[in-house]
Amino acid sequence: MTVLDRISTGWKAWALLFLITFGAAAPGVFLLPALDRDESRFAQASKEMLEENNYILIQYQDELRNKKPAGIHWLQAASTALLTGPDAKQIWTYRVPSWLGAAFAVLACFWAGIPLIGRRAAFLGAALFGASLLLTSEAHISKTDGVLVFLTTLGIGALGRLYLGTDRPGRMAFLVWLTVSASFLIKGPVTMMVVAYAGLGAWVWSRAGEGKGRDWWRPLMAWQGPVLFVAMVLPWFLWIQAATNGQYIEGAVGKDLKDKFTGASEGHGGWFLYHLSHIPAWFFPATLFFVAGLAASVKRVAGTAGLTAAPVRRYALGGLAIFAVLAMLNYGLALVPPFEAGSVAETLRTLKPLPAWPFLFIAAVWWMSRSVPVSPEPADEVKGLRLILAWGLLTYAFFELMPTLLSHYILPAYPAFGLLCGYAAVRLIDGAKMPVSNGAGYALFALGAVALLAVSFPGVTTAYMADQAGEFRTASAGEVLAAWTPYRDYPVWLWWGGFALAGLALIEAARRHVMVAIVLAILSSIALGWHIRIYMLPSQLWVQPTETARLALEDVCGVPGEGALCNVPAPARVLALGYAEPSFILTLGTQNLHPPQTPLDLPTDAAAYPVVYLLNFEDRKANEPITETAGRLRAEAERMGACLTEGDSHYAINYSNGDPVHFRAWRFDWGGCP
């Protein structure tokens, strides 16, 4: 028994896989501040569920968030209630579901791959997927994607067992429906779509290869599955529709989902082959075997009985050509300026059915395969690879063709890609030679490593800091850079460790020491991830505007609930002018106000004091310049005899929109100054 056989068998395999992702993401869970904007919006909505004891409505202060279902908010509220409570205002408790979800996704990947490509390949593929930068990043962000990829991968694992044949088809079909139902309450129909792509793709592939698709899918049609779906999903949708007077579906489907398919929703567009271009960094370190995995799997399925290489090439090249044309069309339409509203030209410009291509491709292959003669079934490994390829490639194509592009959308395809990498690694261990594919994989791995090393090196952040300092209008670049001096340097020993490990991984891969190369590649990813999550990002307060706002408020003892630290009364809330990021509300309290709710006049009731304003003098969007508002507040304080305490200037860049912020906190106390 080899080393790989020993570590991929028994409880230690599951424990090791869990710890790879769980440990890699842990520093980010606890050390990174609340991120804007989606993470803080999700967490704040979950926080308000606890505060108001209302687990039906999803709201951000007084605004309904009719976008995603409530499942992720229930999980976040449960973890926070169990670990701290909403009064703690700590983001890490809201990240726990994503953290656990990502770690369990790696276990689901291993479980899914065992019958499809064998235990050894599944273990290596799951390990590489578990160390990938996108997964470990989503693991410490309190959104839907960590839980989503777990449920999706678990559903595919059950589907794969149905596809290959199992002595428990009813249980596996029930598990597919359970994951689809639970995921629908997390992020709508995403898991359903991915499972459908994998299942339909594999079925049509069997029909094209052997002249018959078989009826392995029939257990999914049993009444228990649809009933389970309705029982899990329908009650909450009825409740939320009633609670919002019918607005939820209009907002979630008629607005949020529709916007993602008709244009770059909220400005989230992208360049040609957007998701493919992110693979070197986001799929690192699995990129070392990604090209070899694609090449080896396609070669294996192309040589099976009944499906010769010629039809495979015909289907694959035809589908690839259509995909390339649609991808260019998708990108080109985004560059066309809008026409007159309601015109035929504008309708054609905004009508983007391109993500339907994977289903159309499946239908076209099915149509062309009607005359294929019946032949014996191929080996389980071939069928398993068909399912994995359909899962990964069709999911990738769907998200690549969407008008709205965000780099994490592609995550449900990454477990499939990881399994392909594991398959290639085992082939190489067994002596296969793939010099061209290996060389391409080495280049892809090196590209990702260089990109990650470059963006996380102190010299690069310092250069970016110098460039951004010139964006301020209310302070000179010299003043800003002087204030940012403490953020220029941070420890780099993990950076050097990641650099060395990545280099050694390439060397060992070239020497065909595959197992050693995989271990080194995973360690390099963990080292670089820890460097970014422990040292780089937490130290860069100059791109963390809410943390910078807290520093400004501390100058005047203006943080709600922290009056004991200053031996003076703390304000009940902070009134922000020129700053409205969700992390401000999450970390400082739901009661705090931001534009346009912030009052522009001082209260006349002595009981309302102390009053603390957070002023952003760089705000360029307010109807009235901040300087005029500040001048009026100062004049009111003098007229009322209130004491004004002014804090120092604090500078930051709001990474959510790229705008500079110049914070000063003003504290007003009733009565004259001592």
Image: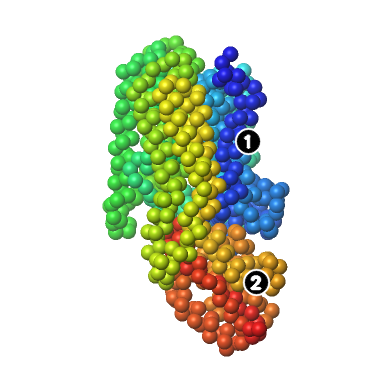
Q: Amino acid at mark 1?
A: Leu
Please tell me in which quadrant of the rendered image residue 503 appears.
top left
Q: Residue at x 47, y 61 (%)?
A: 484
Are there few (<14), some (14-19), or many (20+) residues within 10 Å of tag 2?
many
Quick one: label 2 or label 1, which is nearer the N terminus?
1
Q: How is the image coloured?
A: rainbow
Are there few (<14), some (14-19), or many (20+) residues within 10 Å of tag 1?
some
Q: Are marks 2 and 1 in contact (CB under 8 Å)?
A: no
In the image, residue 42 above or below residue 546: above
User: Residue 208: percent from the left, percent from the top?
Assistant: 39, 20
Nearer to us: label 2 or label 1: 2
User: Residue 286: percent from the left, percent from the top?
Assistant: 46, 31
Q: Residue at x 38, y 49 (%)?
A: 269
Could you tell whether 288 is left or right of 170 in the image? left
Residue nearest the viewer, comparing 255 with 569: 569
Q: In 3D space, how far apart are the residues under numbered discs 2 and 1 (Cα atoms)? A: 50 Å
Q: Looking at the figure, which quarter contains the C terminus?
A: bottom right
Q: Residue at x 54, y 52 (%)?
A: 538
What residue would you read off at disc 1?
Answer: 228
In the image, residue 457 above or below residue 48: above
Please tell me in which quadrant of the rendered image residue 224 appears.
top right
Residue 663 visible? The answer is: yes
Looking at this rendering, what residue extends furthest in the bottom direction?
A: 639
Q: Amino acid at mark 2?
A: Pro
User: Residue 604: percent from the left, percent from the top?
Assistant: 63, 83
The circle drawn on residue 68 is none
Q: Residue at x 45, y 46 (%)?
A: 456
Q: Secondary structure at mark 1?
A: helix
In the image, residue 595 above or below residue 383: below
Q: Secondary structure at mark 2?
A: loop
What residue would you read off at disc 2?
Answer: 571
User: Residue 243: percent from the left, percent from the top?
Assistant: 62, 56
